[in-house]
Image (spheres, rainbow, N blue to C red):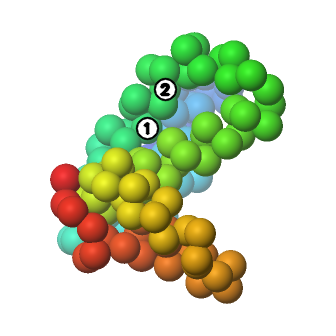
Amino acid sequence: MHEWLIRLRIATADGSGLARAIDYSLNRWASLIRYAQTGNLPIDNNPVENAIRPIAIGKKNWLFAGSERAGKRAAAIQSLFATAKLNGIEPAAWLKDTLEKLPVWTMRRIDELLPIKQSAQIIPT
C-alpha cells in the first residue's frame, strides 16, 4: 500500500485535495502501520475522546470562570477528574480521599495523591 501511495502521489497534481490526503498518509506512515504491526494497540482513542467530551461540551459554560487563574484551576481539576475516570476511580471519592489526606501530606509525596497512583486504593466507578 505504501508503494501504491507513492506511485499515486507522483501522478497527482501538487496542491490538489488528493495530493494533500496522500501526503498526510505518507507523512504519518510509521504511526499508521504501528497498529497493524503490534496487534495490541486499540484502533481508536475513544476512551480519551469520551473523557474530554464533557469538557468540550461545557467550555462555553466555563468561559467566565472569574479570572484566567480560576480558569486554569478549573482546567486542572477537570483533568484530574478525567484521569480518575480513565483509571476506574470515582472522581468524587478520589477528591474526598485526597482532601482528607492533604492537610498532613508532605509536598515530597504529593504525586502519590494523583488518581493514577491511587487506582487500587479508591472506590471504583
C-alpha distance separating marks 2 and 1: 6 Å
Say what amino acid the circle numbered 2 marks.
Ala
Q: Are marks 2 and 1 in contact (CB under 8 Å)?
A: yes
Please name the residue shown 61% across and 40% down the image: 75
75 vs 34, nearest the viewer = 75
Q: Can residue 27 be seen in this snapshot?
A: yes
Label 1, residues with CA under 10 Å away: few <14, some 14-19, many ≥20: some
Q: Position of residue 51 (x, y in %)?
A: 37, 42
Say what amino acid the circle numbered 1 marks.
Ile
Label 2, residues with CA under 10 Å away: few <14, some 14-19, many ≥20: few
Up the image or down, 73 lies above or below 97; here it is: above
Please name the residue shown 48% across and 71% down the image: 101
- In terms of image quadrants, where is residue 65? top right
Residue that carries the numbered disc 1 in the rendered image = 52
95 vs 1, nearest the viewer = 95
Please name the residue shown 39% across and 63% down the image: 97
Left or right of 94, for residue 78: right
Q: Which mark is residue 56?
A: 2
Secondary structure under tag 1 reads: helix
